[in-house]
Amino acid sequence: MGRSPCCEKAHTNKGAWTKEEDQRLIDYIRVHGEGCWRSLPKAAGLLRCGKSCRLRWINYLRPDLKRGNFTEEEDELIIKLHSLLGNKWSLIAGRLPGRTDNEIKNYWNTHIKRKLISRGIDPQTHRPLNETANTNNTAKATATVPTKLDFKNETRVSKTNFITAPSLDFTYNEFQVKAKTECLEEGNCTSSGMTTDEEQQQQHHCHRLQQQHKDKYPSNGQELNLELSIGISSAGKISTGLSSANSAQSKPQLDNNNYQFLEQAMVAKAVCLCWQLGFQRSEICRNCQNTNGFYRYRRPLDS
DNA sequence: AACTGCTCCAACCGCCCTAAG
DNA sequence: TCTTAGGGCGGTTGGAGCAGT
């Protein structure tokens, strides 16, 4: 029943990675590609948990990672995206090529938070600090602050009389990161030290992943399709495709400017999110597609 | 030189969702 | 249908490095 454990925790290293471990991981992925993290440590000769290998690769060793300080443009984009998405670091990272969710999360906590506070803006709500303080004082009496896209407290919002904010469908279309290679090359997932049965099961699993990947991405596999759309709910209530929005701190929130934008959206019935993310108007029209009232931003990986 | 306090970030932890069995 | 593991994600922590005293 179920699957066997990913690793024996008693026989795995913890803590900082050595140069030798890094090199082993790089060498292995260079030859075999990403994916099959469970079998990777054994196959690569690493005394690490697969999860740890995955993290090390994604956050530090990946060749496409951008090193160095964040630019002013990146700062502003992060702030903008955070105001719309909340603490959805992986989604934010998806809009910043070469940056990881962990890196952005750290940068947010160490730099941007302070920067916003110095500007007199609450980093969580993206509203003026004094306004936030006043809101907090009255919050107990008036239930949820109405100027938030609070997915979890949707019923509480609807119970109050605040109708100033339009209701939204905030839909994340599936992130399709085609650079991800789940055992894409035949035979990549064979690992040493396994029994024949285990190896066959592992290969079976990996081949299934390959097939799923091919089914999902029938084209050349180089396109990066990061879709994020926002539109008006016909039912007039807030809903979300973010089923995993489970943290209170990750509730997307909107500032005053974004509400002006949303009011305009009420009239226009459909809006392009790219505009809110700081792209030029000309860029919107080139890249966005209007489908069923939702504008979707599409951008190829190599652009 | 030694100590203290602070900042930064890599790595870990724990949870959730999905899919295997 | 249920249990369990894999993969992914957000939150937290520990230690290295630096500045100030």
Image (cartoon, coloured by chain):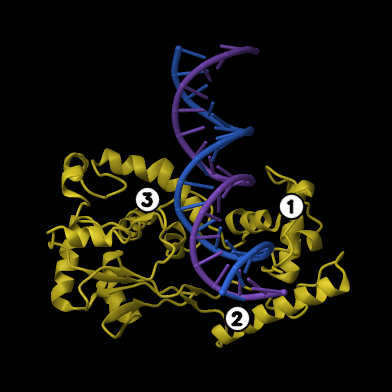
Chain colours: A yellow, B purple, C blue
How many other residues sit within 10 Å of disc 1, few (<14), some (14-19) or many (≥20)? Answer: many
Tell me which residue sits at (27%, 44%) in the image. Answer: A122
Instruction: Name the element at disc 1.
Output: loop
Read off the residue under disc 3.
A249
How many other residues sit within 10 Å of disc 2, few (<14), some (14-19) or many (≥20)? Answer: some
Q: Chain of mark 2?
A: A
Read off the residue under disc 1.
A48
Label 3 or label 1, whichever lies nearer to me, is 3
- The residue lying toward the viewer, choosing from C8 and A72, is C8
Q: Is residue A237 left or right of residue A110?
A: left
Sequence order check, earlier mark of 2 and 3: 2
Q: Quadrant of the N terminus of chain A?
A: bottom right
Q: Position of residue A29 (x, y in %)?
A: 71, 65
Q: CA distance from mark 2 to mark 3?
A: 33 Å
Read off the residue under disc 2.
A213
Q: Which mark is residue A293?
A: none
Sequence order check, earlier mark of 2 and 1: 1
Instruction: Name the element at disc 3.
Output: helix
Q: CA distance from mark 3 to mark 1?
A: 31 Å
How many other residues sit within 10 Å of disc 3, few (<14), some (14-19) or many (≥20)? Answer: few
